[in-house]
Image: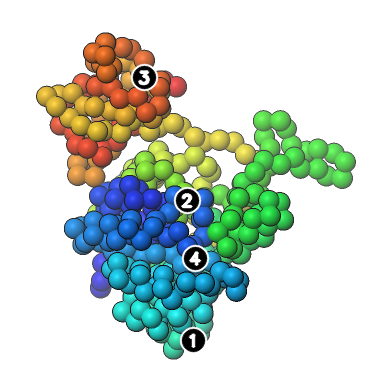
Amino acid sequence: MNKIELLAPAGDLARAKIAIMYGADAVYLGGKSFSLRSRASNFDLTDIAEAVSFAKEYQARIYVTVNIIPHDEDLDGLEDYLSALAACGVSAIICSSLYIAKVSKLVAPKMEVHLSTQQSVTNSAAIAYYHKMGINRIVLARELSMTEIELTNKNSLLPLEVFIHGGMCANYSGRCTISNFMTYRDANRGGCAHSCRWFYHLFNNDEMIDKDDELFTMAARDLSAAAYISRLIEMNVASLKIEGRMKSAYYIAAVIKTYRLLIDEYYQKNTITPDRLAWYQKELNKSENRLASDGYLNGIPIEDPISALVKSTAAQAFVGYVKDYRDGMALIEVRNRFIKGDRLEILSPTCDNRQFNVETIIDEENNMIDICNKPMQLLWIAIPYPVNEHDMLRRGDDDVSV
């Protein structure tokens, strides 16, 4: 049995490096052309080449999304772009257009082609068809249950990739036109405005049935599938995919590290106990700011997976980014408010999570201060054990300050 791949998103080079440092086996990212998520920072060819080089240091891989649904005017420069990606050392592209897949195989035959979830592949017969076309991997539709995934994987001629965490589109496999109509931005050509996540008043005839603090949204709840990882490993699925190229570095670090630990523990112990699963779920909750569910993994939900009542679950858990450490003092780039006396936790790619109480805070003018509330301010704080650049500070389990 090959060890399952943990596949992370990245919206820019810094986040790609964070994903790899925190345990991703592969990272998918978008270039400046032919990619959805046009509002992500995205990568030029120089950045892609640097990401590939960095990934190789960790025995990781880089995949590039070339996943727009192209119109004629979108195809200019496609061959040159695909050739350039191959020259950078990109391991695979992820595409939804079969024409792009065909061109990639012609101009860059050593670069794999992974078929995007936007093709809505839901059965092994379709996979057999794509196998004949030279596709190397299938990203399954997110509307499949675990039973269906198992059956499809058993009969599949190609490796399968399954989404396990992150945003879920309210439309089937992401083929949405709400943004097109509401903002004149084509969601399938990189312009999605996430109109489904806007807040709306809901009327029943002339009666408004929402409340001012409980508006409605069309967006689906996020996916969170920690409870299903053991079974997906047992199925011998090829890859577990995290959604979130628009997400922050903290979100990527926290989610990737948690799934990395979960996957590795299963391979070491061949089981995940209920207590350990609860701990992993608690860790994932520290990075969430929207309601989550298991999507369709347990079958068509009896309870509607659409989160109609909007209540923010944002916890502002992430408070700082470690830039340096000297003689018991860590240089922190502040991201959210914390104060002297707070209990904080270090999130690190190399060490277990550790907590401490904030006792000493010194600003850049060497003044002792009690309150840290200026985003991006650099401060020195005392930490009773060594930390490293790229470690992160977040609120500890016992911290209740806001």
Q: Amino acid at mark 3?
A: Cys
Name the mark on residue 179: none
Q: Amino acid at mark 4?
A: Phe
Name the mark on residue 34: 4
The numbered mark, 2 or 4, whose residue comes first in the sequence reads 4
* Residue under label 3: 372
- Left or right: where does residue 306 sit relative to residue 76? right
Which circle, 2 or 1, is nearer the viewer?
2
Residue 157: x, y in percent?
39, 83
Which circle, 3 or 1, is nearer the viewer?
3
Do the residues bearing badges 3 and 1 touch, measured as CB atoms within 8 Å? no
Q: Label 3 vs label 1: CA separation? A: 58 Å
Label 2 CA crowd tier, 10 Å (few <14, some 14–19, many 20+): some
Element on which disc 4 rests = loop
Q: Label 2 vs label 4: CA separation? A: 13 Å
Q: Label 2 vs label 1: CA separation? A: 33 Å
Residue 401: x, y in percent?
41, 20
* Residue under label 1: 129
Element on which disc 3 rests = strand
Query: Relative to the observer, which residue lies in front, 353 or 266?
Result: 353
- Left or right: where does residue 194 sit relative to residue 398? right
Which circle, 2 or 3, is nearer the viewer?
2
The numbered mark, 4 or 3, whose residue comes first in the sequence reads 4
Do the residues bearing badges 2 and 1 touch, measured as CB atoms within 8 Å? no
Task: Evaluate whether residue 290 shows in this view.
Answer: yes
Name the mark on residue 40: 2
Q: Amino acid at mark 1?
A: Tyr
- Left or right: where does residue 300 sit relative to residue 157? right
The numbered mark, 2 or 3, whose residue comes first in the sequence reads 2
Q: Amino acid at mark 2?
A: Ala
Do the residues bearing badges 4 and 3 touch, measured as CB atoms within 8 Å? no
The numbered mark, 1 or 4, whose residue comes first in the sequence reads 4
